[in-house]
Image: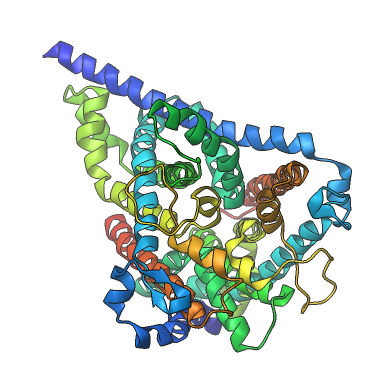
Amino acid sequence: MKKRKKVEEMFFRILSGIASYSLIVILCFIILIIFIKGFNALSLDMIFKTPKGGYYYGGEGGVLNAIVGSLYIAFGATFIAIIIGMPAALYINVHLIRYRRTQNTIRYFLDALWGIPSIVYGAFGFTLMLFLGMNASLLAGIITVALLITPIVIRTFDEVLSTIPKGLHEASLALGSTRAEMAFKVMFKQGFSGFITAVLLAFGRGIGDAASVLFTAGYTDLIPTNLDEPAATLPLAIFFQLSSPIPEVRERAYAAAAILTIIILIISLTARGFSKKYSKLNIK
Amino acid sequence: MITALIITLLLPLIIGIALYLKANPLFELQSLSQLIGSSNWSPSDGNFGFWPFIFSSLYVTGLSFLFAAPMCLLAAIYLTQFAHKRLIHFMHPVIDILAGIPSVIYGMWGILIIVPFVSDVLSPILHIKSAGYSILAGGIVLAVMCIPYMLNMLIETFNTVPIELKEAALAMGATQWESVKHVVIKKSYPGILSSFGLSIAKAFGETLAVMMVVGNMVQLTFNPFEAGYPLPALIANNYGEMLSIPMYDSALMFAALILLVVILIINLIFRYFIYKTQK
């Protein structure tokens, strides 16, 4: 009896150990492959030049158009998402503070909204675009991605706001502030670390998402100068170049993937740093 | 403030209605059961049978779940119960970063590693011919994509089990594993179920990574070494020809509607589970 117990214990300990270490190996392997492949093909031309003539047959140029396009879309979408998301998150935590049930129901629906795949947003964005009579353009891409990331901004910001002690509300209300003042001057300041995290998370998601911009932003070799021009994006640049039969072009897809991964890494690390730095300054 | 919130909350409804209106001409042509059940797909003749695509989606998702779930469950148990605290401190940022990596990059990794692996290593061993771009490859890539997501939720679930419960079990003479088996897993049962459910929903709607490795051929087959054609790939691949064939745009919007409805329902059910248990 005793022996069987020991054997079972050892067996599962080792089995679960193997499972977790192999997961770690797999995950590190992915990052390693992307970087090895990418850095071999990465050059300054890739980052600082737009595609020149014959680029898609192995000619000169880079993916600057896609980098800039992606940044435009991610910045624009994050901006819209902040305008919608920040007040919404504050509303949940200021005006609805006494209605726990409503709060939870809203969170429940927002979480479900988070789960909707980006291709559905893409299809919806496309319908919306046709309905409004727009062409595939920077603006259409921005709106679609904004819809995609707004729930992320709200829920991430809200998660931090909900941990703010109630005493702080009461103190500011007791000092005679209105609810709006309390929301923007006290709650926003207290939850600033969460706000930054939310924005960076949303930005990262926006810059990496391909399925939602596939229909809406179009693709072009030029850097867009106007909102109604089409814009290239990094994930789509990777996708299109990867399906090319020419090896040099595929090499460039690897380089573009490395660029995208580095951008995501920077965003992710900044988010960590910020949330650590600002949460120290909070009133506990 | 409240308008912003209401707009966001109404979003799924608006999306649903918009897609439904767009897909409506299709319903006049064929009945719903015909659309979903028929496997006759020839858009130029006006035949829209979605079954091959739905089947492919289910197959790829099921495969990925089969690969990812046991691994993640064991790993989450190990990381929260057996391993040193340092390991989990190291794992947290790694999981977060991997969860943030875009699906295109997973797709690229799939093309670089998994597709050659399936065609050059796996299929010769089993004496099957395969181009590598197959349902199996899609399942593997999808499983890898789901791992950070699923693992994160499972770790969170296990961390909410009060340590006193485990200590009580240990004090009664149970071994570590027995306390895990009888207390931790039992206590976090709804959480585990929800993590699995939500991961399935995520996998079901994943587009680019799968589309890049799955082969994209309309056919009904149980052979995982053959190519498949999941729903999201159908939408993403054909947006270009959407407006040139009549009813084609309706068909693609209908595919998006199926995805939306299925995923929203799964999400609502399992999120409800989580909220119920959190109380």
Q: Is residue A249 above or below residue A156?
A: above
Extreme residue toward the front, this view? B45
Quadrant location of the C terminus of chain B? Answer: bottom left
Q: Residue A28, image x and y in percent?
A: 58, 32
Q: Residue A77, image x and y in percent?
A: 67, 69
Pick the front one: A156 or A146: A146
Q: Is residue A39 above or below residue B257?
A: above
Residue A104 seen from this side = no
Q: Quadrant of residue B259?
A: bottom left
Q: Looking at the image, which residue is at 11% across and 14% down? A: A1
Q: Looking at the image, which residue is at 82% across and 70% down? A: A224
Q: Is residue B162 left or right of residue B115?
A: left
Pick the front one: A110 or B121: B121
Q: Is residue A71 above or below residue A184?
A: above
Q: Looking at the image, which residue is at 47% across and 80% down? A: B250
Q: Is residue A77 left or right of residue A71?
A: left
Q: Looking at the image, which residue is at 34% across and 49% down? A: B62
Q: Is residue B30 left or right of residue B24?
A: left
Residue B174 seen from this side = yes
Which colour style is shown?
A: rainbow
Pick the front one: A74 or B37: B37
Quadrant location of the N terminus of chain B? Answer: bottom right
Extreme residue toward the left, this view? A1
Q: Is residue A26 above or below residue B195?
A: above
Q: Quadrant of residue B274?
A: bottom left
Q: Is residue B87 left or right of residue B171?
A: right
Q: Quadrant of residue B28?
A: bottom left
Q: Residue A265, image x and y in percent?
A: 68, 44
Extreme residue toward the top, this view? A3
Q: Residue A236, image x and y in percent?
A: 67, 58
- Tell me how many marks there are: 0
